[in-house]
Each structure stands twice: as C-alpha cells, then as structure tokens.
C-alpha cells in the first residue's frame, strides 16, 4: 500500500503526569491516508515516544531531529545499524546528548507545555515517507529513519553520521 501524503504535522502531544505515556495527535496534510500514517508511526513508536519524553523531561519547546537521533542510538535496532556501519554508538550518544544540552535551551521556569514537532523533524518524517514510497515498501523501519537523516544536512545528526563516514548507501 502506498502512503500518498506530502506532509504530516503533530499539532498536540498530551503527556501523562508521570511522563510515561505520550498521546500524540497527528494529521497528514489534507487529512488523507490517516490509517497508513498511523501504521507507519506505530512501527517506529518506540523512538518517537522516547524522543517526546526526552524533550519533555528537558523542558524543551520542540522535539528536534537530535532528540530523535539520540533515541535512535539508544534503541537496539538503531544501535545495531550504526555499529554495523562503523559508528561508535556510545561516543555518538555522548556527543548528541552534549549537543542537546549545550544548544537547546529549556523553557523558562514556570512555563509548562508539551513539546511541538520542529519543522526539520517534520521534513525528516516526510522524507522517510517518500523513501518508503520510492522503494514500494508498506511500512518503515529504523533503517528508513536513519536513511532520512541524510536529507537534513544542516543538523548535528547529519554531521555526526558524516564524521563516522556513514553514508546513506551504508544503511
């Protein structure tokens, strides 16, 4: 089944008080193919849920590609892929975590809100969906998410993959 959408947005994320459960509300552009997009997101929910929780825990206004990349590195499948491509997963996690702490400011004290999807993260999801369509797959996996990172050249995640000489073809 082809996922025929050009954009997806996450207008609202509702967190439980203990931050263990995130309800993510999404809408594909034009409201079409909701079931297919839901299947796609469910296949990658661990990484996305952890990314939302991480951004919320750090009191960040936005969920960024770096939040997602960090959680991808902590996932078993993501770590296996990066390791197989020659990456040093532990060092990469440390570098991404340091980047997040140094470059993404927390919300001011007293401001409580759930994080929003950044524009770059929205583009990353779009790119992953287009990759799925072009390869005629019916669902996405962690490898598709990593491959999509190569479309976002102005991110720390992209720079780090290049530092370890990991290319899209390696994935």
Image: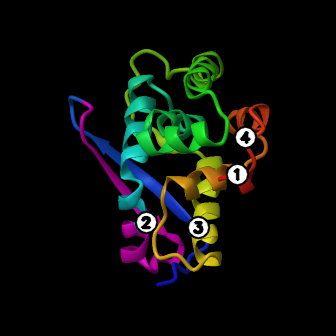
Residue 40 got which mark? 2
Q: Nearer the viewer, residue 17 or 131?
A: 131
Total number of numbered discs in the rendering: 4
**Left or right: residue 169 compared with residue 53:** right
Measure the alpha-carbon separation of dots 4 and 1.
Answer: 14 Å
Residue underneath mark 3: 7
| Mark closer to the chain start, 1 or 2 | 2
Magenta span: 19-39
**Left or right: residue 163 compared with residue 11:** right
Residue underneath mark 4: 158
Q: Position of residue 60 (x, y in %)?
A: 49, 28
| Mark closer to the chain start, 1 or 3 | 3
Residue underneath mark 1: 170
Count neighbours of disc 4 (C-alpha within 10 A) and say few if under 14, some if 14 to 19, many if 20 or more. many
Q: Residue at x 57, y 17 (%)?
A: 101
| Mark closer to the chain start, 4 or 1 | 4
Q: Quadrant of residue 38?
A: bottom left
Residue 114 visible? The answer is: no
| Mark closer to the chain start, 3 or 4 | 3
């Amino acid at each position: 089944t082809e996922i025929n959408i050009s954009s997806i947005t996450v207008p609202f994320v509702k967190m439980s008080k203990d931050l263990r459960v995130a309800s993510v509300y999404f809408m594909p552009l034009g409201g079409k193919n909701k079931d297919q997009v839901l299947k796609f997101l469910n296949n990658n929910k661990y990484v996305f849920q952890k990314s939302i929780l991480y951004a919320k825990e750090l009191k960040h206004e936005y969920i960024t590609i770096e939040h997602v990349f960090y959680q991808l590195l902590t996932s078993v499948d993501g770590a296996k892929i990066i390791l197989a491509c020659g990456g040093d997963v532990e060092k990469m996690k440390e570098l991404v975590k340091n980047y997040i702490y140094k470059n993404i400011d927390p919300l001011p004290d007293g401001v409580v809100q759930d994080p929003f999807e950044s524009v770059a993260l929205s583009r990353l999801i779009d790119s992953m969906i287009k990759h799925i369509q072009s390869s005629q797959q019916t669902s996405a996996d962690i490898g598709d998410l990593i491959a999509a990172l190569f479309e976002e050249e102005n991110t720390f995640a992209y720079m780090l993959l290049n530092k370890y000489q990991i290319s899209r073809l390696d994935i």
